Image (spheres, rainbow, N blue to C red):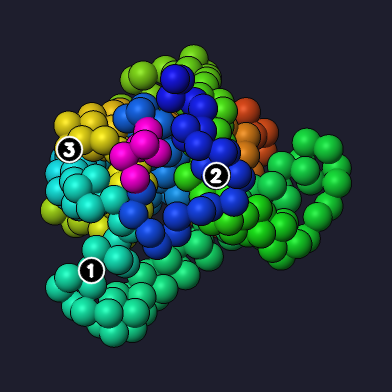
Amino acid sequence: MSWFTFGMTEKRRSFVEQRALTAVPAGERQHWLAVAAIQAGYMVSVTSLWTGALIVTSMTLTDTIVAGTIGYLIVVGLSVLMGMQGSDLGVPTIEASTSAFGEKGAQWLISALLIASLIGWFAINAGLVGAAFSGLLSESFGVDVPVIVSTIGWGLIMLATAVVGFGGLKILNAIGVPIMIVVCAIGVWVGIRDQGLAALQEVQPDGKMTMVAAIGVVVGGYAVGALTAADVTRYQRTRVDVAKAVTLGIRPPGSPCCGPEPCCLSSPAVRISQRSSSARGCRCWASSASSCRPGRPTPATRTPRASTS
């Protein structure tokens, strides 16, 4: 049976999640590529690009890529360890935590920690997507949609994935992840074509961030995802499948989103939403969006070099 299909029973063919808190039986475990696609969907997102944009404004492109590589290797290690527990037990993170914190501890303490973390994560995602969507409609089609309306609309769509559960996420990411990868690849290619590799290497960061701090930003951006890895890896058959799915799903998509792509920011949606929210990942020093030069000051504010004579 193809990894793209739903489980082996009619119950699992439902688009509504059937096993939110119960263990996933062996007959409903999935191919590891299905989980890898979902993990990749977490990574290839606007928030990952924003993490890279935050770092690349404070470090050189090379240092940003190094920080992203090290950070995501740490994330992979944490996710594999937590994911193996999900594969062994077949239950989500909140259920697995009852063995250490008890029923009440899991219900109140762990749930409170997850709520506090994920509310902020969801708010940032919904806000960025809403700003990107409104900016794209305004600049490309002349249609003005309030950011708050776009944010609420796309937030509801994001919430719907919690209802459809694993089966819906699998199909969504099987379609969406390749599209996002192509968009990011085109963005990097357009940036290199228009600006050249030399221009990207010569970008001068606005601030200064240490390597340790940058790695912390990368790890912190996915810390909750690593902690709750069991929520999706409980559909895996073996620990080896967990390691393969997590490594393939996180590591390859992570570094491009934390280096070349945010530096170029050639994707229209990302660039427009950045201007909408006054982010500073890439500053345009010409009025045309196609003349974006990362990190370059405007001609009017460019400071002269001190004389060396």
Q: Is residue 59 visible?
A: no
Determine the secondary structure under disc 2.
Answer: helix
* Residue 136, horizontal then vertical, whole percent: 71, 42
Q: Which residue is mark 1?
A: 97
User: Are discs 2 and 1 less than 8 Å apart at CB?
Assistant: no
The span picked out in magenta is 25-30
Amino acid of disc 2 = Lys
Residue 304 sits in which quadrant? top left
Q: CA distance from mark 1 to mark 3?
A: 19 Å
Question: Which of the two labelled residues, at mark 2 and mark 3, occupies the earlier sequence position?
Answer: 2
What residue is rendered at 17% in x and 37% in y? 239
What residue is rendered at 79% in x and 46% in y? 138
Amino acid of disc 3 = Arg
Amino acid of disc 1 = Ser
Q: Is residue 299 above or below residue 127?
A: above
* Residue 95, horizontal then vertical, whole percent: 30, 66
Q: Which residue is mark 2?
A: 11
Q: CA distance from mark 2 to mark 1?
A: 27 Å
Q: Nearer the viewer, residue 274 or 28?
A: 28
Q: Nearer the viewer, residue 103 or 172?
A: 103
User: Are discs 2 and 3 less than 8 Å apart at CB?
Assistant: no
Which disc is residue 146 wearing?
none
Residue 149 sits in which quadrant? bottom right
Q: Which residue is mark 3?
A: 239
Q: Is residue 8 visible?
A: yes
Residue 262 sits in which quadrant? top left
Determine the secondary structure under disc 1.
Answer: loop
